[in-house]
Image: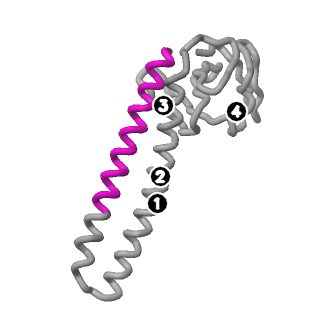
Amino acid sequence: MIKEAFIQYLEDQLSGKIRSLQHELDQLRTDIASDSKSTAGDKHETSRAMAQLEMEKLGKQLSDYQQQLQWVRQLQLQEYNSSETVTVGSLIQLSNGWYFLGPGIGKINYPENSVFCISTQSPIGQQLLNKKIGQEIILPNLNLKIVSIT
C-alpha cells in the first residue's frame, strides 16, 4: 500500500465530511432565520432551542474534523521514507490488517483495504510506537505481529 496515496485519500475524506457538515450548518441557520419570522409561541421557542442544540453539536463535529484535517496535512509535509520503526504518520501492516498512526479517526474504507486510523493515545497505538518489523504487540486475547511499516 502506498502511504502518499492513502494520506491523500484521508484528506479527501475529511474534506468531504467538513463540506457536508458546513452545508448542514448553513441549512440550520437558514431554517432558524425563516422560523424566527413566525410567532408560534412555546412551540416556536422549543423548535428554535432544538435547532440551536443541533448547531452546537454540528459545530463541535466540524471543529474535530478540521483539527484532524490539519493533522493529516501536516503529515503530508513529512518525507515518505520507508522506516524500520513505527512513528506518528506510519502506515503499518499487522498480521490482522492495516493501521495508520495519526489522528484517531477509526476505520477508513480505503479502496484496496480497510485501514484503522489510530492515535498514539489508544492502547494499540501506545504499543505500536517505536516498534520494529517482526515485533509483536499483545492485546487482550490477541497477539499481532508487525509485517511492514511505510
> Which callout, 4 or 2, points to the residue nearer the camera?
2
Q: Residue 73 carries which label?
A: 3
**Which residue type carries mark 3?**
Arg
Percent x, y of residue 103:
57, 36
Structural distance between the alpha carbons of marks 4 and 1: 29 Å
Q: In this view, does 56 lie to the left or right of 33?
A: right
**Which residue type carries mark 4?**
Ile
**Which residue type carries mark 1?**
Lys
Structural distance between the alpha carbons of marks 1 and 3: 24 Å
Residue 2 magenta-highlighted: yes
Structural distance between the alpha carbons of marks 3 and 2: 18 Å
Q: Name the residue under label 4.
A: 124
> Which callout, 4 or 1, points to the residue nearer the camera?
1
Q: Mark 1 points at which residue?
A: 57
Quarter of the rendering containing residue 95 = top right
Q: Mark 2 points at which residue?
A: 61
> Which segment did they paint magenta?
1-28
Q: Earlier in the sequence, mark 4 or mark 3?
A: 3
Percent x, y of residue 111:
41, 23
Proximity of marks 3 and 2: CB atoms separated by less than 8 Å: no
At label 3, counting other C-alpha atoms closer than 10 Å, the crowd grade (few under 14, some 14-19, many 20 or more) is some
**Which residue type carries mark 2?**
Gln
Q: Earlier in the sequence, mark 4 or mark 2?
A: 2
